[in-house]
Image: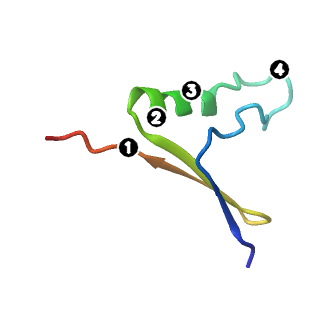
Amino acid sequence: MAEAKTGSAAPNITMETKPTGEGTGLGLSLSYDIITKGHSGQLRVQTIETEGSEFIIELPNLRS
C-alpha cells in the first residue's frame, strides 16, 4: 500500500482538470476562501499516489 501524504498548506489551485477555456476554474479557489476566510476553518488534502486524493474540511464549532 502506498504511503499517504497530507498537506495543510493551500492546495495547488492552478491545476486544471478541463481543457483551457472550459469552465470557470474557480471552484477549489472559492471553496478554499469560503472555508478558511469565511468560516475560520481548514481545507487539507491527503493523497495516496496511484489511489487518489481525499479533501478534508474542518470547521470550528462556534456554538456557545
Which quadrant would the N terminus be assigned to in this image? bottom right
Give how far across and how far down residue 49 sits, in percent. 77, 64
Q: Which residue is mark 3?
A: 30
Task: For marks 4 and 2, give the CA distance.
Answer: 26 Å
* Secondary structure type for disc 2: helix
Q: Is residue 25 left or right of residue 9?
A: right
| Quadrant of the rendered image containing residue 52 | bottom right
First in sequence: mark 1 or mark 3? 3
Task: For marks 1 and 3, give the CA distance.
Answer: 16 Å
Residue 56, compared with residue 50, is above or below; it is above
Q: Which residue is mark 4?
A: 21
User: Callout 4: 10 Å neighbours few (<14), some, many (20+)?
Assistant: few
Q: Which residue is mark 2?
A: 35
Q: Which residue is mark 1?
A: 59
Q: Is residue 58 left or right of residue 15?
A: left
Residue contact at pointers 1 and 2, CB within 8 angstroms: yes
| Quadrant of the rendered image containing residue 13 | top right
Which residue is more in the foreground, 25 or 60?
A: 60
First in sequence: mark 4 or mark 3? 4
Which residue is more in the foreground, 33 or 8?
A: 8
Task: For marks 1 and 4, give the CA distance.
Answer: 33 Å
Which three-letter amino acid code belongs to the residue tagged 4?
Answer: Gly
User: Callout 1: 10 Å neighbours few (<14), some, many (20+)?
Assistant: few
User: Which mark is drawn over residue 45?
Assistant: none
Q: Is residue 16 left or right of residue 33?
A: right
Which three-letter amino acid code belongs to the residue tagged 1?
Answer: Leu
